[in-house]
Amino acid sequence: MNKGEISITRRLVVTVLALEFLSALVLICAVTVHEYDVELRGFDANLTGTARMIMGSVEDADDADDNVVLDLHNTPLERDAFYRVEVDHGKVLGSSGDRNAIAEVLSKSAGFHQIMIGHRKYRFTVLHDVRVVDPGLPTGGVRHNVTIVYGRPVGRVWHEVFEAIRFFIIATALLLGITAIMIAMLIRRYLSPVYQLADAANRVNGVNWQFDAPESAKQTKELRPLARALEAALARVQLSFEQQKRFTSDAAHELKTDVAIVKSSLQLLSMRKRTVDEYSQGLALSLDDFTRLETTVEKLLTLARLEQPVMARDGVVAPGCSMKKIIEEAVHQSMAFGQLKEIEVGVELAENADVPLDRRDALLLCSNILVNGLQHSNHGGKVWLSLARMDGDIVLTCRDWGEGISEEDRPYLFDPFYRSDLSRSRKSGGTGLGLSICRAICTRVGGSIDIENHPDGGALVTVILPVFRSVPISK
Amino acid sequence: MRILLVEDELRLAENIVAALRETGLVVDHAADGEDGAHLAEQGVYDAIILDLMLPGKSGQEILRDLRRRQMNTPVLILTAQEGTASIIELLNAGADDYLSKPFDLGELIARVKALIRRGKGVSNSKLTVADVEVDTIHQTVTRNGEPIDLSPTEYRILEYLIHRPRAVVSKRELLEHLYDFAWEHHSNVVEAHISNLRRKLNAVGDEPLIATLRHRGYRLTGDSRRE
């Protein structure tokens, strides 16, 4: 068992047993007190009875002075009993035991008294009575004041009390033992849904993601939240795992295709001897193919970089950059492409703000959106960029008058390598990563990106980014 | 021999088409699944090279529909997908061969040629009829050991006929298998090539090899042996 390990079973067993032990203890105490009381009364009754018997043994001495004598022949006394019979203050008729101690009791009033004699505690009764000799005489007889002291060790009472509560103690010990076993078994049984849940969770691995919390766990009120949380967490992990898997497989597909093109171009060239012109033409084509491969790799790496969590490097915060400048730069960059398709690019920058993006990423975002708009515009069309503020955020919109997006594509537009059927065959030159990169840039800083169809035709891209607030560099 | 290539990556398709044409095959190219399916169902191809991930209709669907129509054209699948499961599935669905991207262009050509031969019940790349021998790898023809210099079209006609010994091959069939869709169909072109081919073959041997059956077509005479 590990040090510091906490066991619910052990805790419960210990708690229940401790409580049970305590209540048993209280019960035994109460029983003891009660039993002592009862025994003491019996003891006292016994003392009084014996004292009266001794009184009965004080008899007429049949002498001239009408004295009395003590005749104990018919009065059996306990061996450990002390007694003393005095008549008329001072005349001792009989006694046994420690005289001094008994004399001390004698001085006390009638009733019960406890004193220590040696190492033993004794309880005495003091009885005063009058014995009349010859009560039939006209004088009314001779009156003798008799005082009887009778005592026995009080330890006998305790002996009787212990005899009586021994049963209780044994019964309690037995009960504690049975309870300990029962409770350990029951708790183990009650906790079995926990183990079943753990078993089910244990079976989940990279291949088999199926996790259904066992019924036993779902029906246990205390376990239900845990079972549900596990199910939900695993579902989320599975989703992201599958996304990752799909991404990897898509990336492999894409890279293999690009490599296949480069390879086939070069192999085609080397199939037979060719003229210098053919070679230079073939090499130019191969170089184009290679550039395409390079672009795919570059974009994949960009996406991988963007999907890493933002790391504040040693308190250095990336400086914000002006959206206005970035948009102007993006427009300038894609001017050639726009002119080729004779597309008019309009820019409406009503507001400006700094966004918490790296300049490179901001430019990538803006030019990707703009180029996307240009690609989906018809020849001689129009693309409109605007910048506005909304609730403290900055909103970039890009509108084109192209064919728009289909509703079935919409949920997947930002998935890596997703291309709507029309642009699938890369005629448009895209890798299918542009919008994924845009989304990664936006979500990294807590922004968002969305595409919808404009009611008047064409697509509308809306990017919402938080405004950059300069944070003082803390040491 | 006429090949159909269904591949949506244009640059890759261009390279494959160029390579196949250089080895004397006639190639049609379809850039999406629907065109590909339509062409494949014409039944004029001696082999089909099929990509899997296609816009419109996937390669699997094209293959399935083709086999459902009892069309037995040999199909070679080009795939960039991972995993043996999909390969097993494809072969079970009626594919004859597969190559994973990135592939070797030479290997692709060799496999396509092997598929064509198998599709016609031949296993050797050297075909013989009477005293004429055709080497389909090097595209050379000899008669009695003497090399005969043929134009590409003449060679293709002879190759096609030698693959179908003793069968009557119509002019239309020859046209279908010797030219792609870019070609203007003129049946007298075939006649001109046949007569040239006869002349060249007879220059070294005496027996006439190609018989003309009026209104029906052509037939190779003499025993064909496959070494």
Image: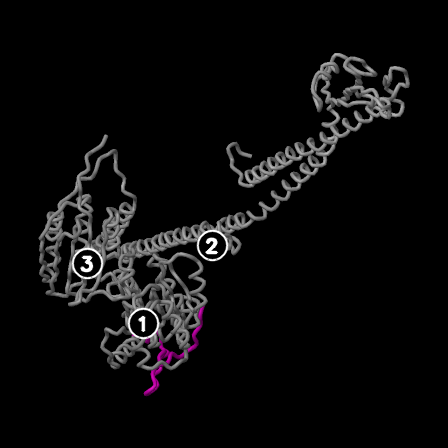
Q: Secondary structure at mark 2?
A: loop
Cα–Cα span, label 2 and label 1: 62 Å
Badge 2: how crowded within 10 Å, few (<14), some, or many (20+)? some
Mark identifier at residue A211:
2
Q: Are marks 1 and 3 on the same chain?
A: no
- Residue that extends furthest to the bottom in the rendered view of this protein: B215
> Is residue B144 visible from the viewing direction of this image?
no
Q: Which residue type does callout 3 highlight?
A: Val
Disc 3 crowd rating (10 Å Cα; few below 14, some 14-19, many 20+) is: many
Question: Is residue B213 part of the magenta span, yes or no?
Answer: yes
Q: Is residue B40 above or below residue A317?
A: below
Name the foreground residue: A238 vs A264. Answer: A238
Q: Quadrant of residue B14?
A: bottom left
Question: Marks 3 and 2, Cα distance to the nearest angstrom?
Answer: 39 Å
Query: Residue B138: x percent and y percent?
Result: 34, 63
Chain designation of label 1: B
Inspect the image, locate mark 2, and give the three-letter code of the amino acid beneath it.
Answer: Phe
Check residue B115 for magenta coloring.
no
Q: Residue at x 72, y 27 (%)?
A: A158
Which amino acid does the dot numbered 1 rest on?
Answer: Arg
Nearest to the observer: residue B187 or residue A97: A97
Label ID, residue B128 = none
Q: Position of residue A145 (x, y in %)?
A: 78, 19
